[in-house]
Amino acid sequence: MRLTTKGRYAVTAMLDLAFHSQKKPVTLTDIATRQTISLSYLEQLFARLRKAGMVTGVRGPGGGYKLSRAAIDINIADIIAAVDEPVDSTKCGGKGDCQEGQPCLTHDLWMGLSDQIRSYLKGISLAEILEREHVTEVAQRQGQHVEHVVNIQKQEKLSA
Amino acid sequence: MRLTTKGRYAVTAMLDLAFHSQKKPVTLTDIATRQTISLSYLEQLFARLRKAGMVTGVRGPGGGYKLSRAAIDINIADIIAAVDEPVDSTKCGGKGDCQEGQPCLTHDLWMGLSDQIRSYLKGISLAEILEREHVTEVAQRQGQHVEHVVNIQKQEKLSA
DNA sequence: GTAATACTTGACTAAAATACTAGGTTTATT
DNA sequence: AATAAACCTAGTATTTTAGTCAAGTATTAC
């Protein structure tokens, strides 16, 4: 499990998507504008997210992307795993025979730790993050812009 | 908080150090050999670890490195923070004014998540990891390979 | 059917991080 | 004095990151 800016971009984009795509699909152009990520880079990330079955593309005018599953069924670990190339961190393919056994000793230690982080992130869903940080903090500090968004969301929820 | 191969190298080296430096200092050459990390790369990492006050260099023949504190007082988050350049992930310096307020919404979300990971890793000490896999001690004494260690550990889990 | 909109693909690139190389200088032990 | 080790400085090849650019294909509103 690696934690890089690439993964952060993906999580950020997914959070944006979860937040804005409740009613209709969200275009990557919108996300790119809101999150100041380049469109083509987003396209790369979403190609992977789509292959991982986490988002669904809707073509044609009025199209965009939406979550394939409910936000509560999408966890952070899966998002990061989807965009990150899986790196073999063992140097011996997990065989345990790199060198006299010793090296794989610490490899095992690290991998155990890595697994813990993974399972920890697996326990956090998009929905939980949105809910946790939701209107409370950000809206207060922010004023009209976010309030506007929040209002729209509330209206959508009411009409849904 | 980033999780990269660099951080893994640092944690691995620190685990090795914690494991072997109980009596006398450990040379980087030893660690380099055991963990198959280049000596100069280790030097770079340990320069940072030393500046962070986690290890102490002992010069001269018979010298090497040792932990500055007890292994139980050194946590994983600090190790990673020591070798990783702190990247400003906000693009607005935490001011919250990147762009219309919106971007900082998700920035905050991610940073909150990042903080959780950090505090999680802060709760794990070198000593705990070594202890958790305490069988390694046995392996060391008996000169066995890790494959055996893993088997022993599985048996212990079964019998526990 | 056409145009608009949106997704797909692939090639390319500047900048940064990674991992290493080389060659030193101290410092302390023997 | 010889040596073993930390410690320092600079450079460098490779890979990854974070994009850009260009030319597609698919879908739907009209």
Image (cartoon, coloured by chain):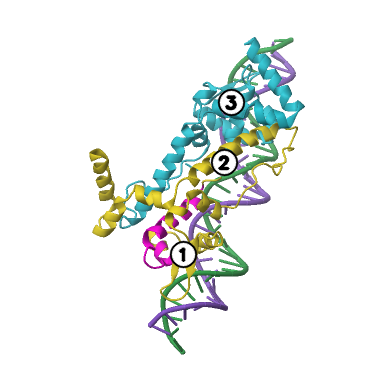
Chain colours: A cyan, B yellow, C purple, D green
**As drawn, is B3 to the left or to the right of A19?**
left
> Is B50 inside the magenta-drawn segment?
no
Inter-mark Cα distance, 2 to 3: 17 Å
Element type where label 3 sits in the image: helix
Residue A46 horizontal/vertical position (percent): 57, 31
Q: Which residues are magenta?
A: B4-31
Q: Badge 3 sits on which subunit? A: A
Q: Is residue A83 above or below residue D15?
A: above
Element type where label 2 sits in the image: helix
Q: Amino acid at mark 3?
A: Glu
> Is B16 inside the magenta-drawn segment?
yes
Q: Is residue C1 above or below residue A77?
A: above
Q: Amino acid at mark 1?
A: Leu
Q: Are marks 2 and 3 in contact (CB under 8 Å)?
A: no
- B159 and B14: which one is in front? B159
Q: Is residue B2 above or below residue A100?
A: above
Q: Which mark is residue B115?
A: 2
Q: Earlier in the sequence, mark 1 or mark 2?
A: 1
Q: Quadrant of residue A130?
A: top right
Residue C3 horizontal/vertical position (percent): 74, 18
Q: Residues within 10 Å of mark 3 (few under 14, many from 20)?
A: few
Inter-mark Cα distance, 1 to 2: 32 Å
Q: Which residue is mark 3?
A: A131
Q: Mark yes or no: residue A77 visible.
A: yes
Q: Amino acid at mark 2?
A: Asp
